[in-house]
Structures are given as structure tokens and as C-alpha cells.
Image: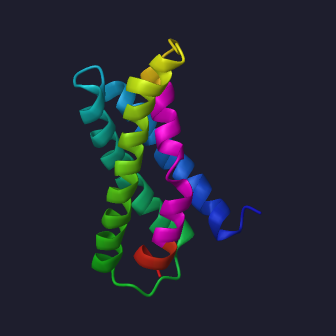
Amino acid sequence: MLRSQFALFILVGGTAAAVNFGSRIIFSLWMGYATAIVLAYLLGMTTAFLLNRLFVFRETTTALHHQATWFVIVNLLAVAQTLLISLFLARWAFPAISWTWRPELCAHAVGVAVPVLTSYIGHKHLSFR
């Protein structure tokens, strides 16, 4: 199972998500929630690109600059998903159900998880084809 491309993508994505999630917590000490989400996502995206090139999509024939360009495009769509879902949950959905335990932390965790499948499809067929 760990040899399958999707399983490796999940492992790499989990590592990048941990970088993203952890850095958002640290960034939030000095900046607003939305800005911290975007900066953390950029750090996680850089981690994901490097690890995906090294471990997941090693047999790509696409030139590096095309890989990087498509990787950024796919991730811009994913960061929009992450931001919208995180803000929706933290600002509207959780207050509506009286969720008070670390709403921004929980909202961001869900927001980071949602783009996993869409990102895999985009990277497999566009970034690292």
C-alpha cells in the first residue's frame, strides 16, 4: 500500500500539512488569522513541491519550470479552498452550533484536509504528468 503513488502523496501531503498547520499556529502569534493561513500555506506548498518531486512523481517528463508553474496554479485553487472553508467554519458554522473549543484551530484543520483529493488529481495530471 505504501508503494502506491496516492499513498505516497498522502504521506508527503501529511508532512506538508503538518508544516502548514504548525507554522500557522506560530504565525498567528504575530499576525491575523487569514494572513497566517496564507503564509503557512505557502510554506507547506514549498515543502509539498520538493517532497513530491523527490518521492511521489519521480518519473515525470515535464520540465521543472512547467512543474513549478502548474504546482502553483493547482495550489492557488487549493489555498482558496482552504481559506474559504477555514473562514466559513471559524466565523459562521462553528458559532452557529456554539462550538467554542479552539474554533480557528479546528476550522483550519478541516480546511487543510479538504483539498487532498483535488490536489492529487491536479498534480498527477498537470504538475507532474
| Relative vertical location of residue 81 with respect to residue 92 in this rendering, above or below | below
- Residue sticking out furthest to the front: 96
Comparing 107 with 127, the one in front is 107
Comparing 71 with 49, the one in front is 71
Residue 32: x and y, percent?
A: 24, 25
- Residue 98 in the figure: left or right of residue 37: right
Residue 3, by quadrant, is bottom right
Is residue 117 a member of the stretch shown in magenta? Answer: yes
Residue 21: x and y, percent?
A: 44, 35
- Residue sticking out furthest to the right: 1
Q: Tell me what residue is drawn at x 51 percent, y 61 percent.
A: 118
Please provide the residue range marked out in magenta: 106-123
- Residue sticking out furthest to the bottom: 61
- Residue 36 in the figure: left or right of residue 101: left
Q: Tell me what residue is drawn at x 51 percent, y 34 percent.
A: 109
Comparing 2 with 101, the one in front is 101
Q: Quadrant of the N terminus?
A: bottom right
Is residue 99 a member of the stretch shown in magenta? Answer: no
Check the image and tell me how it is coloured.
rainbow
Residue 99: x and y, percent?
A: 53, 15
Comparing 35 with 12, the one in front is 35
Q: Tell me what residue is drawn at x 41 percent, y 61 percent.
A: 50
Q: Tell me what residue is drawn at x 49 percent, y 22 percent.
A: 94
- Residue 106 in the figure: left or right of residue 63: right
Dominant secondary structure (helix, strand or loop) of the stretch shown in magenta: helix
Residue 67: x and y, percent?
A: 36, 75
Q: How many marks?
A: 0
